[in-house]
Structures are given as C-alpha cells and as structure tokens.
Image: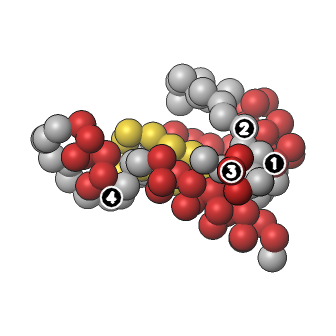
Amino acid sequence: ILKEDGINAKVINIHTIKPIDREIIISAAKETKAIVTAEEHSIVGGLGSAVLEVLSDEYPVPLKRVGVMDTFGESGKPKDLLRKYKLTADEIVKQAKEVINIRAK
C-alpha cells in the first residue's frame, strides 16, 4: 500500500521483546529516520514501548505505535477486533504517513 504512494518501507519481525534486538532497531532507525511499530497488544509495556526505550537511549527518531490503546480488551471475531482497536493495514499506513510528516519537519 505504501509503495503505491512512493513510500519505501522496511518490515522487521521482532519476535521477542526480551531480549530486544537493539542492533536491528538502531540500524533501521539510522536507515529510515522514522519508525512505526505494530502489535496485537497494548501499546503500554509492549513492543512499541521497548522500541521507544532503545531509540531514546541510542538514536532518537520519530516513532508511532499501532496497537491496543490503554484500555481493557474485549472478545469477538478477529476481523471485528482488528477494526475496533485500529490494528488494520489502513491504520498502519496512516501512522507511517504521519511519522514521515513529523520526520520532514
């Protein structure tokens, strides 16, 4: 989706938060100058928080987190929950464009 708008994106699968792969996060930040994290988890204490800690210590760049806001979860059909908690591809694209705009300032 981003490529259609002329945006080159890099996808990194960070499969564990502890230990976090600091090197790959810093390398991606240096290459892209902006980061978007996406997770099916609360943004509080999740992947986005861990990546933010690494970046704030080592190489600060704009970051947007896509995930469940600080709220209690619900049960339901997966597609419905992804829409409810804004975990869709469209939301990831929106956040990527926002972080690019922040980076450009």
Identify residue type, mark 2: Lys
Three-letter amino acid code at the position of disc 3 = Glu
Q: Quadrant of residue 19?
A: top right
Q: Residues within 10 Å of mark 3 (few under 14, many from 20)?
A: few
Q: Earlier in the sequence, mark 1 or mark 3?
A: 3
Indicate the quadrant containing the C terminus: top left, top right, bottom left or bottom right. bottom right
How far apart are labels 2 and 4 at the CA level?
Answer: 27 Å
Name the kind of residue labelled 1 in the image.
Thr
On the image, the x and y values in percent for residue 47 come to 51, 40
Residue matched to label 3: 4
First along the sequence among labels 1 and 4: 1
Q: Amino acid at mark 4?
A: Asp
Residue under numbered circle 2: 10
In three-dimensional space, the C-alpha distance between marks 1 and 3, rounded to whole angstroms, equals 18 Å
Which residue lies under the disc numbered 1? 32
Q: Residue at x 68, y 50 (%)?
A: 4
Q: Position of residue 40 (x, y in %)?
A: 38, 39
Depth check, mark 3 against mark 2: the one in front is 3
At a point 59% along the width and 28% down the height, the residue shown is: 14
Q: Position of residue 98 (x, y in %)?
A: 63, 67
In the shown orientation, is residue 71 left or right of residue 34? left
Mark 4 highlights which residue?
70
In the picture as drawn, the residue positioned furthest to the right comes out as 31
Horizontal relation, residue 88 to residue 105: left or right: left
Looking at the image, the residue that sits furthest to the left is: 75
Question: Marks 3/2: CA distance?
Answer: 15 Å
Q: Residue at x 63, y 56 (%)?
A: 96
SS at mark 3 in the image: helix
